[in-house]
Image (spheres, rainbow, N blue to C red):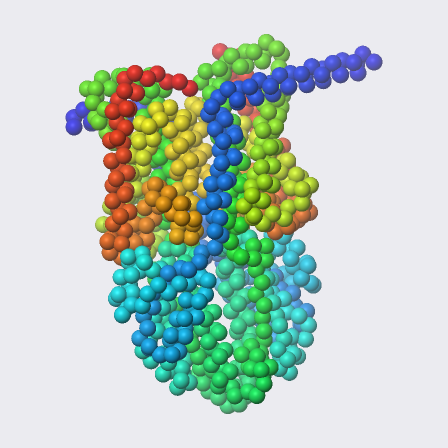
Amino acid sequence: MKSVIDIALRECGIIRRKPIYWFCVIVFPLLTMLFFTSIMDEGQPEDMPVGVIDLDNSTTSRKLTRLLDAFQTSHVVAHYPNVTEARRAIQRNEIYAYLYIPQHTESNLLASRQPEISFYYSMHSLTAGALLFRDLKTVSTLGSAAVGKATMTAKGMDEDRIMAFLQPITIDLHPIENPWTNYNFYLSAVLVPGVIMLFIFILTPYVLGTELKFGTARELMARAGNNIYVAVAGKLLPYTLGFVSIMMIYLLYVFGALHFPTAGGVGRMLALSFLAVLPSQAFGAFCFGLMPSLRMSMSICSLWAVLSFSIAGNAFPVPAMDAPLQSVSWLFPLRHYFMIYQASVFNDYSLSGVWLNIIVLLMFCLLPLTVLQRMKTTFNTYTYMP
Amino acid sequence: MTIIKDMIGNLTHGFRNMCDVWAEEMRRIFHDEGMILFFIVLPLSYPILYSWVYNNEVVRDVPVAVVDDSRSQLSREFIRLCDGTADVEIVGYAADMDEARRMVGEQKVRGIYHIPSDFAIRVNRGEQSPIAVYTDMSLMLNYKAIFQTATSVSTAMNSKIQIKLAGNYTDREDEITTAPLAFHEIAIFNPTGGYGNFILPAVLILILQQVLILGVGLMAGTARENGHYAEYRNMKARGIGTLGTLTGKSLCYFMLFAVICLYLTVIVPRLFSFVSLAQPMDLLAVMLPFVLACIFFAITVSVAVHYRENVLLIVVFTSVPMLFLSGVSWPQSNIPWFWQSISWLIPSTFGIRSFVRMNTMGATLVDCMTECRALWAQVAFYFVTAYIVIKFRQKEYNEK
């Protein structure tokens, strides 16, 4: 134990001399945290630009336009003379969607000739497209309902009967834990830990490998009493503490200051920060043990870490991927982090639903044991080759 | 006459110097396995991997549990219709909400449709009758599938109920009763709403930029570690100046990345049948400044690399934020001004925007003029900074 602390102190000395460590453990993760949380501060994109092609120029068409503009997500920025112009405006990135109201809409409506309006929304950006689709659909439905409502009011029906006729079955939506459909809650909660884990992934082989690179590996082993367990534990301990504190700062910031939903409670949240840091360190150490070439192990770790963002399945769900990828996803710590986070922090489900993910993360921690002997030989005999 | 002769002589001399640097840089790339990994293997394999991940494009059959307290013909019709849609699959009935919640907790289902006991009674009584939809919000695509399915099924059932109540004589009257104002909903440019078509064009362009920065940074780091001074000593001895070095190196990277760019922007989208509407000449007109901007940007950034491995530490993590800054995931119109202005410094911002618009939305060069001009401005700006960086390195040698 004493020698572990001795090695850890030696490591602290190295950290103090090299600014790159400060950047990777503290500055970059903090910057990333601020970046994601501030860029999505709105929660949901508001007032996105949409266009209107109003060939009718009637009370009804203007009412629809005003209604659309009044929605939270849409902002009517321009009128276009025809569909081609509006389409080109989308291609120029000026608007994301447009509503098309043809001639005689109002007169056909009043004469019960069922006029047709159309809305076009670009799905090149799923977020903008899906949100604007919702607004445009609501506007069109309301436009349709308004006619029925006017007719029935004229016939002397009361509000309840009108609504019961127009919409007999209603959908009562309960978006659990995120009723605002806040994208910040949904994306930052995985992307930021993902970036922190990325740093752990890359920094761990770097920390171990630089001992070889700068030819200090033998001195390290001597100081650790030729005990590889002590050497590795001592070297990684300062980073464990550093990264766990950064994870906790992040959790405190998003849950404490930004009020991200945390039904699962503080205890689980803090326990999760250990489950994010330790397996990632273990993975990094394992890669280095397997491939003592500093560059190769770092490259593999960074490829793994970058791929994590896709295969974690927080945006595109894992069950929708091809079967082989579903199995491969078990090899990515971020995937398990996401599973445990959504079950036990974001929601308040019992941990029994994700026990397998917890076990796998703990097994990640044991991975380096398989290569430590190899690493010992490496430290004692290898010389750095660029 | 002699002036012209001198000029031609100078030019050919300069050209030869540039070609020397070019060839030398090429040789160095192919002698270094790390460089081959970053410049060749990575750009070839990563797009394939990513395309595979998003190959299925859409989410189908999201599992949902039903708590049917109504047990009526109408409630069963609702469940049957939901199960029949592409997006939702009813995987089980739960006896009560507690059981359904447990199913959500066990990750077996992503949402619950709860049909209250008086559901059919209320409909038949001519009252509004709600169905409660509970969704797990940890995944937006699941939420969307569960909610939109319930809405569209209820709309369809509503129309049937309206027709029954209205007591019309003809089909046309029924149509007008259910939809006095008809509407068409048309998704354009990615009509299936596929995730791969949405994210992949952006990722392809980002890969190009990041690979270049990593590769060039790695070379600079290596040069700094060992051969650095030897490299510049040779050049000085042969009288190769800053401009020759810069253009020589850039031409070497350009040669490689012209091919990689073609692979990423033309071949990969076709391999996986992604939307690809770009006109060849238009594509060329934006990719040329983009690759050049990336090269000079990479040379500029490489000044921060002291050891070859450090480049991974400072570059890899920027990928996700840069993807966000391009306005793909989060709409460009809603990025705060502060981050907008930072995004102008990065070539991928404009590279991604113009490529997505040309490739996915069939825009032409005229539509992407802003981005194109911005890229050329970046080329000019980063050319100057890259020149300064190389000049600085040469000076560093001269002082040693």
Tally of numbered discs: 0
Q: Is residue A165 left or right of residue A93?
A: left
Q: Position of residue A239 (x, y in %)?
A: 29, 33
Left or right: B94, with A110 as reference point: left
Placement of B135 over or under A210, stated as above or below: below
Residue A278, position as x, y percentages in the image: 27, 38
State the residue at coordinates (53%, 22%). Answer: B30
Taking the image as shown, residue B156 lies to the left or right of residue B101, namely right
Report whether B152 appears left or right of A247.
Answer: right
- The answer to whether residue A163 is seen in the rendering is no
Above or below A215: residue A255: below
Q: Quadrant of residue A376?
A: top left
Q: Find residue A14 and report its horizontal and vertical position in percent.
A: 31, 24
Is A381 rendered above or below residue B128?
above
- Residue B23 against residue A136 in the figure, above or below: above
Residue at (49, 11) in percent of width and height: B400
Task: State the image quarter where residue B176 is shown.
Answer: bottom right
Q: Which residue lies furthest to the left in this view?
A: A2
Q: What residue is rendered at 51% in x and 42% in y?
A: B203
